[in-house]
Image: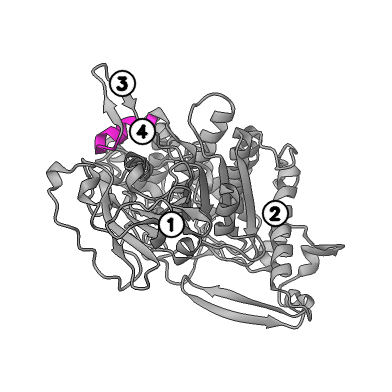
Amino acid sequence: MDEIKIKEGIFPAPPTGDAGELPPMNAGGPPGREPIILPELDWDNLTLHWAQYQDKWTLSEDGTYYALKFVYYATKLLSRDHQYMNIYVPAAYLSPDGTVNPVGACGGYTARTAPVVMYNNCGGWMSSIPGDVNPDYIRAGFVHVNVGARSRDLGAVGKGPAACVDQKAAVRMLRLNDEMIPGDKNRIISCGGSGGGQMSSILGATGNMADYYPFLEEIGAAGIEKLPDGTYSSTIPDHIYASQCFCPIADINNSDIAYAWQRFDDPNIRFSGFAIVGEKELTPFQLALQKDLAAAYAPYINSLELCSEDGVPLRLGEDLRSGSYYEQMLRNISDALNAWLKDKTAPDGSLTYEQAIGFEGKETHSFPSADAYFASLKDTERWLVKEEGGYRVTSLPGFIQGTALPRGKAVPGFDTFYCQAENNAFGQPEEAGVHFSESVGSILEKNKARYEPLAGAEECDMDAYIAHSKREDLKKQVYLYNATHILLDNAAGKVKSDFAKFWRTRNGTADEHTSFAIAYNLCMAAKKAGAEVDYSLIWNAPHGDVDGDGTGTFVQWVQNICN
């Protein structure tokens, strides 16, 4: 393929039946959702003045909260359908005329002390339209802000780091109008799942980071000014207090080597994506590539010089199934299992739990004992031992096979061939999609001659992959979307940002769409930078905003870190 076509993002057509992978959620929300009707505004002359919103609060039918929708957080909108937020506050915090009631109380908080939970709906790395109120947050006394953001499905205006820029603009808008909006703006907690978990991590890692100032000025965010000398002035901070990341699709440029490491010795070579009907098999080329990607994970992890929460240096052996890092991964799975058993076991020893079916359904399962439950799994003698005080998982491939953990990704599955996944989040505005994983690109370049004869290999797409992986503009763009690396660079004194003080992640052990290691690495990077972390897996839970099951809840965590 010639250089011009590579730059334009023109790639060979995917094989017949290879549909582009879709996210679990899209910008339009659940199927059947009512169309969004935007307010009538002078879009060319937007301001951030609160006077236009003051009298538009509406009280909910049950009288428990006030809602204020379509609050635009920038003056030079690039997507009016997305760049706004909905604000929900406990009714006690406002007077009927829309002014703050400083003495009203809810959940032990007042309008001036309540935490502000800012949720984004960027699942699948897609653009988000602000969603509805979360009643749990209102009952707890939190201010709930549901923020919209641009992302990869919007073409030129959704290129990285657009989703984080929009969240930052929302934070600035909240602080600009601090006196008029209930909630403690020094206690803003970001929250999101999957791609939204990734966007939450970026917001948490990049507080007041000057690299974002040009993008904020471009959309007319509050408190940003471009000076005559070309530099930027910021008078309103955009850091946050804490970051909750459910199953974050983070460290995106290394997600493929992490996923390959987790699955390289799994004999199941069939995979299914969100948009794939049925299952497909990995090709001989993909299987060979997977082994090489997995092998690259050990030197990558060892280069990060992470430590566990107990301060133990985390290292991965060259065989990929030994070393303190591997043992920590097994410990994380074991902890999740033991917490789940404690939560689900009744006093008579019986075990009852709900199993998620897809994104909406649930199915209840009951067993007379934990032993009966384990008998329903496969070959537990190969990967599970009972010890005093609980159970211990002894083998990652044994656990994957024994619990029949499905494979939801191809190889590669994030920076995909034919540029069908997160690829359109990166590149120049005119580019439909690019390859952003330098780690995958370097492996393709090193082994291209060995791959070319294998079934499934496409020379022209390998060439495009290799070319893109060397582009400096893409490396910079990807870095601004990598919270793990930004936190580690903070720890090393290479970067200055005011990162969140508190971090929490949750992944299900039945999550087929990302490696468990990604969220753990993020937490340990935050710890290395000096933050407090709350990491846990949740046994038997799928990809999504999974919580509880013996590991505490997000609401409880917010209450703990705010008291």
326 is within the stretch colored magenta: no
Q: Mark 1 points at which residue?
A: 104
At label 1, the amino acid type is Gly
At label 3, the amino acid type is Thr
Determine which of the numbered discs, if any, sits on residue 236 in the image. Answer: 4
Q: Is mark 4 on a helix, strand or loop?
A: loop
Residue 272 visible in the current orientation: yes
Give coordinates of residue 210: x percent, y percent: 39, 28
Q: Earlier in the sequence, mark 3 or mark 2?
A: 3
- Using the numbered discs, state the Cα–Cα distance from disc 4 to disc 3 in whole angstroms: 16 Å
Q: Name the residue under label 2.
A: 332
Q: What element carries label 1?
A: loop
Q: Residue at x 23, y 49 (%)?
A: 79
Q: Which of marks 1 and 2 is in front?
A: 1
- Magenta segment boundaries in residue numbering: 211-222
The one nearer the camera, 269 or 83, is 83
Q: Earlier in the sequence, mark 2 or mark 4?
A: 4
Determine which of the numbered discs, if any, sits on residue 231 in the image. Answer: 3
